[in-house]
Image (tube, helix red, strand yellow):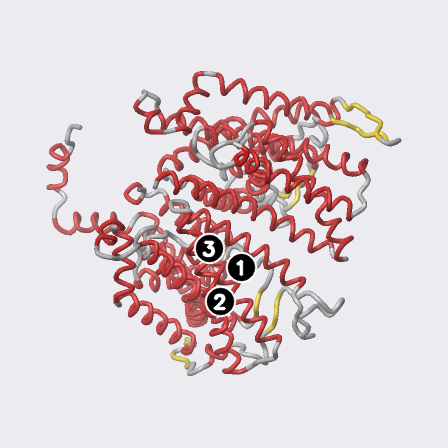
Amino acid sequence: MADPAPVREPVAERRTGVFASLREFARELGIPRLLIAVFVIALFGVAAATHMGLAALVSDSLVRVARNGILVLALLPSVQGGLGLNFGLPLGIACGLLACVITLNAGLGGWAGLALTAVLGAAIAVPAGLAYGWLLNRTRGQEMMVGTYLGFAVVSGMSIFWTMAPFHNPLLVWAIGGHGLRTTLTLTGYWDKLLDRLGAFTVAGVTVPTGTLVVFFAMCALVALFLRTRAGLSLAAARSNPRFALAAGISDTHTRVQATLLSTVIAAVGIVVFCQSYGFVQLYTAPLLMAFPAVACLLIGGASVSRATLTHVIVGTLMFQSILTVALPVTSQVIGGDISETARLVIQNGMILYALTRRSDTT
Amino acid sequence: MIRRSIRHGAVPLLFLLLCVLGAWAAHLTPQFLVGELLARFGRNAVLVLSLLVPIMAGLGLNFGIVIGAMAGQIAAILVTAWGVTGIGGFALACVLAVPLAMAFGALTGALFNRAKGREMVTGLIAGFFANGIYQLVFLFALGSLIPFHVTRLLLPQGFGLRNTIDLTGIQYALDDLWTARIGLGGQLLRVPVVPFALIAAVCALTLAFQRTKLGQELRAMGQDPHVASTAGIDVDRNRVIATIISTTLAAWGQLVFLQNLGTLNTYSSHEQVGMFSIAALLVSGATVSRATVAQALIGTLLFHTLFVVSPLAGKALLGDAQIGEFFRVFVAYAVITVALVLHAWQHARRDR
């Protein structure tokens, strides 16, 4: 192949200094990410210019960041472990929802109820995550597709379970017929917004849901710590070079199961925190598409299919969730229609598509 | 040999058993079942057949046929807006759908070429993305940015298409062209001949296509893209062509579907096309890398039998039609999951 580099060199030389480094920065960031960043700034700009309650918008954004953060964090181990984006997130979510329903059925409320639900969800997620990891080891190369459809199958299978499950708490089942869980369970009186309200304070009109945010950051710190332990490091080693890792005594069959397990468990805890903040437990088809916004968050933060960091999790969640929060009021004021759901579809899936089709990333 | 034939036959046989048991439990009469199946087979078979060419070319299951369905819908919307009715309207829609579907197919194919090895998940996400763009155009731009003055199709706010569009103009345009009446158990069944002739034509064309030079090239690519490439086949170009063919067939398939249904759910008719067509194909025992015309037809028949039977059986057995509906959705997803797992499993074993 003829080397095109010498031809390009003079052009590159002319673009010296600030401009060149700016170009480099833009290439690293990717055009979609730049567009999204501009979009976020524009949204907040319009909101400020039209004198919308900026404080309220920021408050809402913070609540949503805290609410969704752990679900985004759940994707990190699977990328680290070389399994790509875990579209099978609904599996872990189903475990968490099952825990919610079990403790609610037993009438457990308050802090004990919330803690027990989270622990129970994590416990149920262990066998599920192990099985999922085992399956993904046998379907190497197609993890994302298998994960997506496994997630769909689990959610639709659970729909059958919710209608037939032997739960009898009248607050949970349909009033008519007396069996079959309702589509939405209210948490008022159980553990509705317990964490959101814990230590919440207001600065300049912005309310900070301290408890949930602290839990999110604590989980991030835990995952960061784990990734620095021996097990965490071998996870990354097995991803970047399976054969080399094997020579060093690390089997990637093992680390991949660990990564999947961790991802599933975090997702189970994540949905419990989500429900706590939301105030409702949504069953049936609600979790079907939950993996996609979470994946989009991670990617918007700067992650790729094979590389992700904690910064990507936090930055991505901040950016995407603020778009989702601010887009609705701003666009309805500007164009008089709710374009936010459509914008979400385009941004979310456009981002995933961009990540999937990056040449440098295809193996 | 025996093991293989069991593996190939097990899925459709299990499905057949499920259907028979369900039909028996729900006390369905054969007349009702045959009538329902004729309608459902007639409107879904072309969509399922549209999946075959990409499988042959080694692209796997084309989840991007959703985008083809959108092309078909855009054509149907245009024809309705212009007020062209009857078979002329349907034919015009088919013609209009071609350039749209070809353009969409070329774009999807280019995406697939950038995501080799993960075409299926890319196709799925591309469908979601295209859905967003479709909403952007038809829910917001139409009537505001794009001039459009057919107020009967617009939402009261003056822009954006209504959620359901009446396609009475082209309803049964194809079905009623020639209906044969067949007596079955004392009842007259109306059999729409033309859609079935169309399905037969698509089958024949697919079979004939496999024997053309391009068809052979696609098959060689499906066997081994590296060998095909060294043999001088332009693999990337052919993959785009395969995607274009599939997308165009899907657009026509969606038009056949819509002319039978008579109403268009503007923002949701296309959404589940991919999932249900793919599940139908896989039910027959077809795999991600191998599917025949016969399998597409058998699969469509079996899957839609379950679709008719499932809610009724759920109601008869458990007193709740909802469970049956959940069950059939679960079956669709589960069938796809199992097929994907088996495919990846075999691949992984071969690589080792």
Which amino acid does the dot numbered 3 rest on? Gly
Pinpoint residue B48: horizontal percent, then vertical percent: 58, 33
**From where the camera sits, is residue B345 visible?**
yes
Labels 1 and 2 positioned on one and the same chain: yes
- Position of residue B238 relative to residue A270, above or below, is above
Quarter of the image where the N terminus of chain A is located: top left
User: Distance of mark 3 from mark 2, alpha carbons?
Assistant: 14 Å
Query: Which one is earlier in the sequence, the residue at label 1 or at label 2?
Result: 2
Name the quadrant containing residue A63: bottom left
Q: Nearer the viewer, mark 3 or mark 2?
A: 3
Q: Which residue is mark 1?
A: A287
Mark number displayed over residue A227: none
Q: Residue at horizontal 69%, vertical 55%?
A: B323
Mark number displayed over residue A88: 3
User: Distance of mark 3 from mark 1, alpha carbons?
Assistant: 11 Å
Name the quadrant containing residue B225: top left
Q: Which residue is mark 2?
A: A271
Secondary element at tag 2 = helix
Quarter of the image where the C terminus of chain A is located: top left
**From where the camera sits, is residue A46 visible?**
no
Secondary element at tag 1 = loop
Judge by depth and name the residue closer to the eye, B46 or B173.
B46
Which amino acid does the dot numbered 2 rest on? Ile
Side of B138 relative to A25 (left or right):
right
For the residues bearing labels 3 and 2, Cβ distance under 8 angstroms: no
Q: Nearer the viewer, mark 3 or mark 1?
A: 3
